[in-house]
Amino acid sequence: MYYDDDADLDLLKGKTVAILGYGSQGHAHARNLKDSGVDVVVGLREGSKSVEHAQAAGLEVTTIEDASSRGDIVMVLLPDEKHHDVYEESIKDGIAPGNLLLFGHGFSIHYGEVEAPPEVDIALVAPKGPGHLVRRQYTEGSGVPALIAIHKNETGNAKDLALAYAKGIGGTRGGVIETTFKDETETDLFGEQAVLCGGVSELVTAGYETLVDAGYDPKMAYFECLHELKLIVDLMYEKGITGMRHSISNTAEYGDLTRGKRIITDQTRQNMKDVLTEIQDGTFAREWIAENRAGQENFQRMRAEGQSNAIETEGKELRSMMAWIDTEFEEG
Ligand SMILES: NC(=O)C1=CN([C@@H]2O[C@H](COP(=O)(O)OP(=O)(O)OC[C@H]3O[C@@H](n4cnc5c(N)ncnc54)[C@H](OP(=O)(O)O)[C@@H]3O)[C@@H](O)[C@H]2O)C=CC1
Ligand SMILES: CC[C@](O)(C(C)=O)C(=O)O
Ligand SMILES: [Mg+2]
Ligand SMILES: [Mg+2]
């Protein structure tokens, strides 16, 4: 594990860090690095809606081409599915030998979507959390842990620079692990599909719909299955599963221990293994790349279906009454 004392922010002094994209991760990295005293330039496509947000945050904005050629370190924080095309059209020619090309996730390098030139260093700094929380936790004085991995290190400086970058975004406050592009990519995809996003979203929706279908008040179902999830997960985050069980009633804990395995069954565990296999053998990556080449028709349809679920309309109304909940993303 690497913590603040293991990384040297001074290595970024005199260097320009180009952040390509100002989305969830892009805005967080750009703003955190700037607040850490790093010289940052943000690269955005022509007509980007993000220009005004980045400029309002005091950041210099230029084109992706210009940022790629000005950056000693060039961090690609564009959607994974766009990396191939944008790299070929706007990034590749600007990267000088000896510069460091960084990614926030290993997908495009691991699955061969980006073919990098031999004389350029390549590494990743992948926060283990959503970009908006990378920013929020940094401003609060804490930080989202991160992974680093080195794919190519012609200069011999890639690891120290990746660690310095991780420190600049707050990652070394939470702890940084060195891994490989392969392991970062596969564990990240598995986590988001089986547990953090796919698993939890389906679990919450299924629980909500079970209560509503049985005739219970949808508002009660929302509080029970979605709102309270954060409060339970906060305890797990702070004190572990045992700590969470300390805070809940004995009745809840007995139900947890005896009923949980009827929800996550041996079949569910087998399904998790199958999902992992599809990640490891490239099936998922090929499917996602093909979906994009075909214009994202299925992706957009499923996204719209998810947005119109009853739990979403119910939740929007209930959250609007809780003044302490920040319901909008201001940028990113
Ligand atoms: N989201 C997250 O929290 C995490 C993401 N990552 C990784 O970080 C990387 C970035 O992900 P994320 O932050 O979600 O990305 P976003 O979808 O939030 O990125 C949006 C940004 O990319 C720009 N963009 C989108 N399409 C294009 C294009 N065709 N050409 C040029 N610019 C484009 C957008 O431009 P405009 O402003 O003009 O719309 C915007 O600035 C990915 O590799 C992802 O896997 C890693 C950890 C967590
Ligand atoms: C959990 C989803 C994630 O992997 C992340 C926020 O870490 C992502 O790709 O957005
Ligand atoms: Mg992740
Ligand atoms: Mg991910």
Image (cartoon, rainbow, N blue to C red):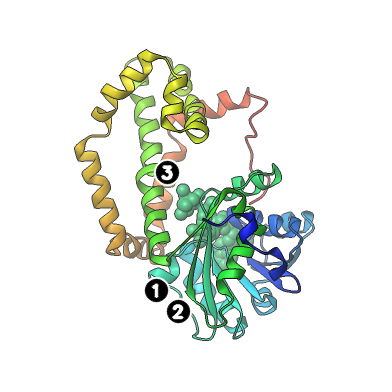
* Mark 1 beta carbon near ligand 1 (under 8 Å): no
Q: Is residue 79 visible?
A: no
Residue in the image at 26% along x and 57% along y: 277
Between 67 and 318, the residue placed more toward the observer is 67
Which of the two labelled residues, at mark 3 and mark 1, occupies the earlier sequence position?
1
Please provide percent x and percent y for residue 265.
22, 34
The residue to which callout 1 is attached is 112
Q: Is residue 220 left or right of residue 207?
A: right
Residue 323 placement: quadrant: top right
At label 2, which amino acid type do we have?
A: Glu
Between 38 and 92, the residue placed more toward the observer is 38
Badges 3 and 1: C-beta atoms under 8 Å apart? no
The residue to which callout 3 is attached is 197
Crowd class of label 2 (few under 14; some 14 to 19; many from 20; radius 10 Å): some
Q: Disc 2 to disc 1, how far (Cα)?
A: 6 Å
Q: Is residue 208 left or right of residue 61?
A: left
* Mark 3 beta carbon near ligand 2 (under 8 Å): yes
Residue in the image at 29% along x and 54% along y: 276
At label 1, which amino acid type do we have?
A: Gly
At label 3, which amino acid type do we have?
A: Cys
Q: Disc 3 to disc 1, how far (Cα)?
A: 25 Å
In the figure, 88 relative to 249: above or below?
below
The residue to which callout 2 is attached is 115
